[in-house]
Image (tube, rainbow, N blue to C red):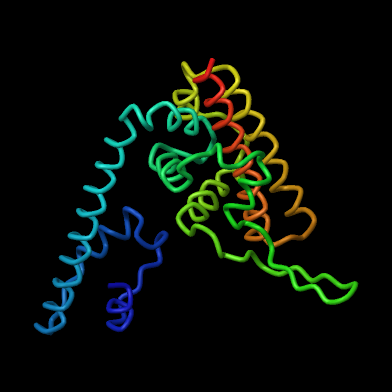
Amino acid sequence: MSKFLLRQGRLYHDSKAWSKGHRVWVRQQRFDLAAAQQTFDAYLRALEEAEARLESLNSQVLELAQTPAYAGLVRALSCLKGIDTLSAVTIVVETQDFRRFPDARGYMKFTELVCSEDSSGDKTRRGGITKAGNAHLRRVLVEAAWSYSHQNTTGPTIRRRRHGRSTGVVQIARRAQDRLHRRFWRLVHRNKLRQVAIVAVARELAGFVWAIAREYSTMQVA
């Protein structure tokens, strides 16, 4: 759809692509050439059908989050800033059993949000992340990490998620919020690219995810 509109010389400059305003603008497009209009209508139908399928899948995931096997841990992980119910379910499903990892470092390594390394003799060169692990888990953590680049405040959504959760879980979530916010801006002020800083934050966020999962598991045993 985007490339088709670009080829037709239809450019949108008022806000970000696929924002609410952009979607309204897209649906208002009309073309004099019948073939162009038919192509546009086909792209629009495909887009709407894909969004409908995605909405249906999201609803199924939200239903899964309410089942006994997932509900408690999902609510605990949702105390972390940047992680909502869908993100928490993804983390739980992709990880399966947090007990496989003896410590936070082990889980952080599992996410593969670690730098590649090229060693020769006494020299060690570090490159970008290896991207050898679970792509779904890595995507969720990186997306969540961007929330720590914003102002370090606790809004009503986060307060609502933390309401009624255990003191231990909430304390870990608050500690993560403060530390990861400082971590991001410390790296940026050291002239690190924002994308590099976000990967570092996502890696540490994985450690806090593991800590909350362990805290929740301890409460279940008790």
> Residue reaching furthest right?
122
Location of residue 180 (image quadrant): top right
Above or below for 87 versus 70: below
Left or right: 15 as drawn, with respect to 158: left
> Residue reaching furthest left?
34
x, y percent for residue 165: 49, 19
Q: Measuring 69% from the left and 67% from the top, which residue is drawn there?
A: 116
Above or below for 133 versus 86: below
Q: Measuring 63% from the left and 54% from the top, which residue is drawn there?
A: 198
Q: Measuring 11% from the left and 84% from the top, which residue is drawn there?
A: 35
Q: Nearer the viewer, residue 171 or 27?
A: 171
Location of residue 93 (image quadrant): top left
x, y percent for residue 101: 60, 42
Label count reads 0
x, y percent for residue 70: 38, 32
Above or below for 74 versus 147: above
x, y percent for residue 73: 45, 30
**Which quadrant, please, contains the C terminus?**
top right
Left or right: 1 as drawn, with respect to 213: left
Above or below for 62 versus 109: above
Q: Nearer the viewer, residue 73 or 18?
A: 73
Q: Measuring 30% from the left and 37% from the top, which residue is drawn there?
A: 62
Left or right: 49 as drawn, with respect to 7: left
**Which quadrant, please, contains the N terminus?**
bottom left
